[in-house]
Image: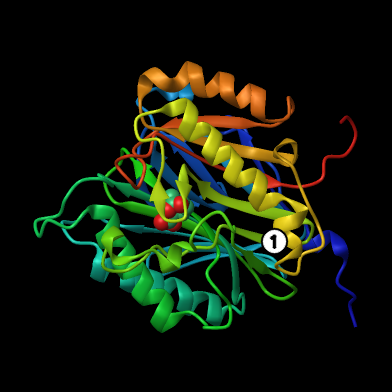
Amino acid sequence: MAVRSLQHERIESRFVGVGQDEGSGILGRIVFGVTSAAPRIENGAPTLHLKMTDEARDSFAEVWSVSGETRSGTVNDLVFAHNDAYLFCAGFIPASDHYTEAARKTYADAFALVRELSFPKIFRMWNFIPHINGENPHGLEVYRDFCRGRAVAFEEDYASTAGMPAATGIGTWGEGVGFYFLARREGVVRHIENARQTPAYRYPQRYGPKPPSFARATHMRNTLYVSGTASIIGHETVHEGDLGKQWEVATGNIAHLVSAENLAAQGVTDGYTLHDLDRIKVYYRREADLPSVMKLSRAAFHPDADIRFLKVDICRADLLVEIEGIATHRHGSD
Ligand code: 3EB
């Protein structure tokens, strides 16, 4: 009987120039560029294009790779690839006035796929929503409309024991909702909350008919996948209009989230600091804030951390910045 090599258990992401990711073991790629489109297989791997900028020179790709053989496929407009241990899947919901039903169906299809392919443990998800702060014809904010459909799919179609994963829900300049996620076949996957913040899935109704479906982070194999994190204490936005103060709260939230103290209380014997974060995305709302967020990032994160800045709308109209990343223990230089 074959013994599964630990090599096959490794999964990693990197940010590269568009088209700079030739090589084997690519599970999926996301092009943060100038157009949005439904995902398809490109150069042998599922590829999702998201319009996040007007400038081609600001484009980059996030590439997820594993060792060992991968297989890819398409079902119900979902495009996926997997090896023995991990699944990458991307999907797209065409532009619409109403997202509840389409989101419910598309996420239900995704959950059916993880069951059929036996990758029941989703550990990280990203959702990119156009006109996120706009209103639909019924006066419901687009983000809240999306959240309603996603919540119903999680309630009805996702294993109740699996728990909701770390996620990002953020704006895009494209038309249509693009999303991608990663799932694991077996092993321990732990979803983590933050004592400073109300679990998003328990936000009160004033933020929408159904709450957002995500955990603050997910821990797996010495790695902590940190969700999009903003200037929210409890369930309330704090420091409306003040970028510097929102930055302090958002990074403070992450610092506590990743700390040994917060993790120990949730069964994880590990602990990180802001300097352990990498593959960081800083989403900011106002063009004029870019120099500030770059300066604040340099002061907060490790000099070797790869950080990308994306100017998009954020799921609450009063939020100016949102930060995500992946915490691992750095090797080599300090
Ligand atoms: C928040 O804490 C900010 O809807 O998937 C962060 C991460 C946010 C994920 C999502 C939304 C989502 O509520 C917004």
In the image, the residue with mark 1 has its CB under 8 Å from the nearest atom of ligand 1: no
Amino acid of disc 1: His
Residue at 47% x, 34% y is 246
Residue 201 position in % (x across, y down):
44, 67
Q: Nearer the viewer, residue 43 or 127?
A: 127
275 is higher (above) or lower (below) than 2: above
124 on left or right of 244:
right
Element type where label 1 sits in the image = strand
Number of marks in the rendered image: 1
Q: Which residue is mark 1?
A: 219
221 on left or right of 232:
right
Residue at 47% x, 55% y is 234
106 on left or right of 59:
left
Can residue 59 be seen here?
Answer: no
Q: How is the image coloured?
A: rainbow
66 on left or right of 288:
right
Residue 152 position in % (x across, y down):
34, 76
Can residue 189 be seen here?
Answer: yes
Q: Nearer the viewer, residue 176 or 334?
A: 334
Q: Quadrant of the C terminus?
A: top right
Q: Nearer the viewer, residue 56 or 152?
A: 152
164 is higher (above) or lower (below) than 194: below
179 is higher (above) or lower (below) than 159: above
Q: Nearer the viewer, residue 312 or 323?
A: 323
Residue 277 position in % (x across, y down):
69, 40
Other-residue count near label 1 (Cα within 10 Å), few / some / many at <14 / 14–19 / ≥20: many
Q: Quadrant of the N terminus?
A: bottom right
Residue at 68% x, 74% y is 185
Residue 243 position in % (x across, y down):
43, 27
